[in-house]
Amino acid sequence: MSHLQCLTMATALILLQALSTVSSTILSRADRITRLPGQPRVGFQQYSGYVTIDDKKQRALFYYLAEAETKPISKPLVLWLNGGPGCSSLGVGAFSENGPFRPKGSVLVRNLHSWNQEANMLYLETPVGVGFSYATESSSYEGVNDKITAKDNLVFLQKWFLKFPQYLNRSLFITGESYAGHYVPQLAQLMIQYNKKHNLFNLKGIAIGNPVMEFATDFNSRAEYFWSHGLISDPTYKMFTSYCNYSRYVSEYYRGSVSSMCTKVMSQVSIETSRFVDKYDVTLDVCIPAVLSQSKVVNPQPQQVGETVDVCVEDETVNYLNRRDVQKALHARLVGTRKWTVCSNVLDYEVLDVEVPTINIVGSLVKAGVPVLVYSGDQDSVIPLTGSRTLVKRLAEELGLRTTVPYRVWFAGQQVGGWTQVYGNTLAFATVRGAAHEVPFSQPARALVLFKAFLGGRPLPEDF
Ligand SMILES: *[C@@H]1O[C@H](CO)[C@@H](O)[C@H](O)[C@H]1NC(C)=O
Ligand SMILES: *[C@@H]1O[C@H](CO)[C@@H](O)[C@H](O)[C@H]1NC(C)=O
């Protein structure tokens, strides 16, 4: 790259920063949240609203920013993305996992392990059709795929920086879980490509939790997980690993032609695993009202006394985000739909994209020097730790990275928070003990320790 180009870029960035400060303080001020209904008093700022990513077709993405509790200017910017595809980072990420509040009845209660203790947290509802994000033409919801989503997310960030120039060139991390194992690496890759021409994104690392990175390995680890946790019998395990494995079933399912063999195997698997066990955390009880609302059982079990995790938080969130006063406070609109839902029912995503591997993209990020953390809630049977661990180890071997931190326990407080292994300087794997698919939901304290170490570029605590 020539000096001239470098100079032009730097000047452009500074100019943009200077020019936009005046006008965009006003822009971002319109998005400032005075106070969310039922919210306790806090000392940090919150913003939410829309960024139009395509003026012609009127497609707009909704974001929620919870600035850091203390010294936001000296803390990094962290983008959080939930998966699905089609599920909301606002409802799941912010209000059930690592945001500052969780809805409880008509009020919000503080999350004592909110990630905005360490960073400015930006939650994005993506792609259009998810949560409060919308397109005015419903055709925009059809055929949405990974490529479109990654591009839209990139454009979102570029335009978001115009509203929030104080975050230009801030250390930026991208985090997320589940199907965000596609979104996060794909967005990071686009940023790196974009940076070659216009150095805009100060990308410092990515962290993905229980991520889909390679379809067959991830999905087929489910059988052994079910079996070893006692959710299926020996004969069913045998069928589930020989006659029809899970990747084959999903593959057939999304092509609309499930074989009779797979139908038989999957029906036996479902009977044995029971719908009264949460597949996203096999040790967690289910939210009885939510399960029963879809069933004919009329005698709901009372909630267990002494429960520390609110397994009904999803219902609480749906109620909260559908309140008019809450939507007004958030500057949110419902366009073309009458209800905010956790996962979109208008988006028609290209489901076969689930089969596109992203582990190779993760590899290219590591090669480009971007630190990567893959972490796994170890009670999740949907994307089990064993698949992720296998994929990371295989990647490390391919890249010729040697182990710098051998497989060992890590600590959160005086207890084991999970296990970890680090390869080279940039590729890390960690489990979170007792955690669900949504790690910060069921193990918020351990998740915060993990997050802090990740931001600091440090291995997880070796002792206490
Ligand atoms: C952006 O931040 C990096 C450090 O993270 C610094 O080296 C660089 O000079 C900054 N660029 C601009 C244009 O401020
Ligand atoms: C899953 O099933 C497919 C199709 O029968 C097969 O090609 C693949 O090897 C199986 N994978 C595993 C891990 O058993």
Image (spheres, helix red, strand yellow):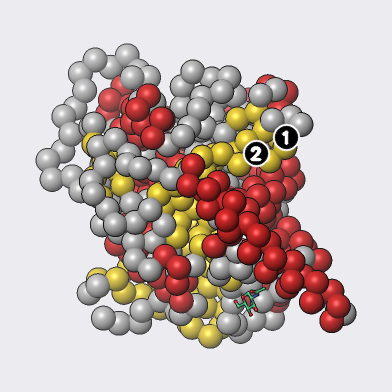
How many C-alpha atoms fall within 10 Å of the one at disc 1: few (<14), some, or many (≥20)?
A: few
| Residue at 27%, 29% in the rendered image | 288
Q: Is the residue 78 above or below the residue 428 in the image?
A: above
Q: In the picture, which quadrant includes the C terminus?
A: bottom left
Q: Is the residue 249 above or below the residue 322 in the image?
A: below
Residue 256 spot, x, y in % from top left: 69, 25
Q: Work out how far the residue at label 2 is from the one at label 1, CA to CA, in angstroms.
A: 6 Å
> What residue sits right under mark 1 in the picture?
55
Q: Describe the element under mark 1 as helix, strand or loop.
A: loop
Q: Given the image, on which type of amino acid does mark 2 rest? A: Thr
Q: Which residue in the rendered view is the most extreme toward the left?
A: 305
Q: Which one is in front, 400 or 442?
A: 442
Left or right of residue 154, residue 336 in this image: left
Quarter of the image for residue 295 reads: top left
Q: Which one is in front, 305 or 64?
A: 64
Q: Which one is in front, 31 or 270?
A: 31
Q: Describe the element under mark 2 as helix, strand or loop.
A: strand
Can residue 162 be seen from the camera position used here? yes
| Residue at 34%, 66% in the rendered image | 70
Residue 257 spot, x, y in % from top left: 70, 25
Residue 25 spot, x, y in % from top left: 53, 53
Is ligand 1 within 8 Å of the beta carbon of the residue shown at mark 2? Answer: no
> What residue sits right under mark 2 in the picture?
52
The reply to whether discs 2 and 1 touch (Cβ–Cβ < 8 Å) is: yes
Quarter of the image for residue 426 reads: bottom right
Q: Is the residue 404 above or below the residue 132 in the image?
A: below
Can residue 205 be seen from the camera position used here? no
